[in-house]
Image (cartoon, helix red, strand yellow):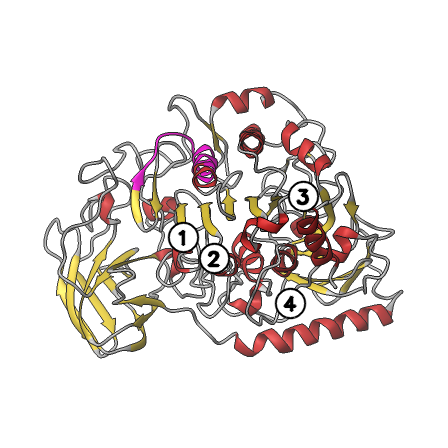
Amino acid sequence: MNPLKQIAAALVMLLPTASTLTAEDAKPNVVIVITDDQGYGDFGFTGNPAIQTPNIDKLSRQSTLLNNFHVDPTCAPTRSALMTGRYSDRVGVWHTVQGRSMLRRREVTMANVFEDNGYATGMFGKWHLGDCYPYRPEDRGFQHCVYHGAGGVGQAPDYWGNDYFDDTYIVNGKLQRFDGYCTNIWFDEGMKFIKDNKDKPFFAYIATNAPHAPYVCPEKYVKPYEGNPQVSLPEFYGMITNVDENMAKLIALLDEEGLADNTVLVFMTDNGTAAGVKDGRGYDGGMRGSKTSEYEGGHRVPFMIRWPNGKIEAGKSVERLTAHVDVLPTFIELCGLDAPEIKFDGSDIGELIYTDGKEWVERGLVVESQRVVDPIKYRKCAVMTDRWRLVNGVELYDLQDDPKQTNDVAQQYPEVLKRLRDQYDGFWNDVSQEHDLTSYMVIGSDHSPIVSLSSHDWLIDKLPPWDQSHVIRGLVAEESFWAVEVEHDGDYEISLRRWPVEADKGINDGTYGKAFDYKQARVVIGDTNEIMDIPEGAKEVTFKVTLKKGITRLAPVFIGPDLTATPYYAYITDRPFEGWQTPQGMGVPVFDPDFGRIPPQRSGRPGRTVGNR
């Protein structure tokens, strides 16, 4: 029997009231906290001499630490692998934009598994695996969701003008305005969910956008770092210290509610540091590389797991190779869950958690940073074993003697080079079989009566305008399209906009940024290819089209005397329009009039400071 199941069975037998407990009563709660762009060296317990993370440091001593734990070098791919136990390249998420950040609808998620086993499921913060049906968190097994759009607050699909403070987020598909700083809101909402569901097993996924850029933070967290020559960027460090303070509140809540002992608490990050090293300042954790890098600093991150009732050892460090793809298969065994047959790329690592791991068979794992529309073999990848790293198919590093990866030993160890290349070839031949698959955003579904599309998901080879600051500056690319699936035959309305509906400005209006001189709009979808003139001052141009069920592409453009370009925003519905939804407690439109007149990474509003990207 698996050691995790042995322990779970023994625990149930030892409980004083075991005869009256059901299997559901004995299930542990699960809380995962994952931060964004925080690297291995951005903690006190890993050796950073300047950063203040006392609560996470304390948690690391109460937990078993997976000290050779790896993720993909960027955020959406890591999250897709974490949620499925399968390689990001296999599940369709090998980029953060360009229509390649949507988790394929066929995949079974961690939330699906917990929900099917009677758990309450909630997610809070950053999802980044699809903003449209059927890819949203509420479509993927999460029963209660509070989150921002896309990969960061203020990116193109996010509510216009969000800037980390007093923002509008999505709550179970509806817009709602919140007061306060974004990280505080994710933790507060997560803790409310925990309290509301404390009498049954729950899975809470708290995924902060901090400390992702733009580096915006309440001033009180930044001031302790100002003027310190060891600090890379005070705002980045301040965002991390704010996360640490929120971790203290979360841990205190679990204690106060009597939940700590039977809660599996995980803390991890999604990739290497983005701003932990700058101009010779900061701490690199003793590794080469940072976010997006195929070298160790791009993908080795801390992972700590605490479960007192499960007898997970405090202070233990697991040095064997582990990764994001191991988490779901391990949870299935750890929590005694029923699950469908899934071909995992990861493994149940209970043997490493509960034993000395001497019987653990060495294996090879792959992480990569594709960040292109169509994956390329050997692009920014690392094949890993306990000892070796094959980088980009040609460089070989012995981590045992060279943790900083300064000495390429490919010529000294040709047999190792060949073995790892063969492992990569097997990986590639497997996952590349479905690289031609595209994730289509569904229109015409009752689950999403109005579908909002943005330039973030243009399916284009060139990097699209994925951030609101890009939209403000009027960045354009060649003509592009969105991949959509029409759920049923019928009549649809497609509205094209230069600004999102909540900005409430004309197509050629330059109040918030660059003004254009578009004269006409064209929509191309299915059998439809129509052109309309843009009336003076029009905020949108709406086409009424008849579509057939099936997959297609929406390829609209605005046409001017000097430029033809795809609109940044499009809205599609198949039912009578009843007006745009506005956030709870707010009028029409809702927008910060100062936004766009100065850069989004701005200073000067009370209680916040902003660092440079």
Between the residue at mark 4 and the residue at mark 2, the CA separation in whole angstroms equals 22 Å
Residue under numbered circle 4:
345
Between the residue at mark 3 and the residue at mark 1, the CA separation in whole angstroms equals 26 Å
Q: Position of residue 340 (x, y in %)?
A: 55, 69
Q: Is 242 rendered above or below residue 75?
A: above
Q: Position of residue 593 (x, y in %)?
A: 25, 33
Query: Which type of secondary structure does the marked residue at label 2 adopt?
Result: helix
Q: Earlier in the sequence, mark 2 or mark 1?
A: 2
Which residues are the magenta region?
176-191
Circle 3: residue type: Asn
Q: Main secondary structure of the magenta part?
A: helix
Q: Position of residue 321 (x, y in %)?
A: 75, 56
Given contact means CB atoms under 8 Å apart, are the residues at marks 2 and 1 in contact? Answer: yes
Residue under numbered circle 3:
309
Of circles 4 and 2, the one toward us is 2
384 vs 449, nearest the viewer: 449
Between the residue at mark 1 and the residue at mark 4, the CA separation in whole angstroms equals 26 Å
Query: Which type of secondary structure does the marked residue at label 3 adopt?
Result: loop
Position of residue 443 in the picture relative to residue 261 (left or right): left
Position of residue 119 in the picture relative to residue 504 (left or right): right
Residue under numbered circle 1:
143
Which residue corresponds to the image point at 68% horizontal and 53% vertical from the top-left?
A: 8
Q: Earlier in the sequence, mark 3 or mark 1?
A: 1
Query: Which type of secondary structure does the marked residue at label 1 adopt?
Result: loop
